[in-house]
Image: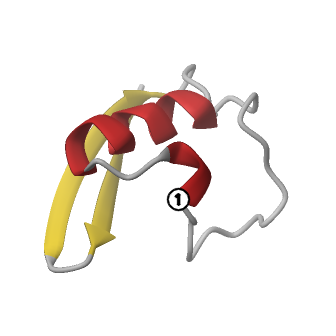
Amino acid sequence: RELNFTIEYKDHTEVILIHDTETIRQLRMKISDKLHVSPNRQNFDNWTSKHYDDHVCMF
């Protein structure tokens, strides 16, 4: 299953698709590739769970 993320950064919005078997780290890397924001500077808002790490799968 694919997950659709809408990423907002400054005045730019980017849609990123990932599979539910991918990790948060992989999501961060895709964000970094598209928006040039280092993974350690990314902050996820509006998530139901605030407890996650880079090794957690998305499903």
| Quadrant in which the C terminus appears | top right
The residue that disc 1 covers is 42
Does any portion of residue 6 appear in the rendered image?
Answer: yes
Q: Is residue 14 above or below residue 32?
A: below
Is 55 displayed left or right of 20 in the figure?
Answer: right
Q: Is residue 30 above or below residue 1?
A: below
Identity of the residue drawn at 35% across and 34% down:
30
Q: Position of residue 52 (x, y in %)?
A: 79, 49
Q: Position of residue 2 (x, y in %)?
A: 37, 30
Residue closer to the observer: 36 or 11: 36
Q: Is residue 25 above or below residue 22?
A: below
Residue closer to the observer: 10 or 8: 10
Identity of the residue drawn at 46% across and 47% down:
38
Q: Quadrant of residue 14?
A: bottom left
Residue closer to the observer: 59 or 52: 52
The furthest residue to the top: 21
- Mark 1 Cα-neighbour bin, 10 Å: few <14, some 14–19, many ≥20: few
| Type of amino acid at the residue the image marks with label 1 | Gln
Which element is circle 1 on?
loop
Is 40 displayed left or right of 3 in the figure?
Answer: right
Identity of the residue drawn at 29% across and 70% down:
8
Q: Quadrant of residue 13?
A: bottom left
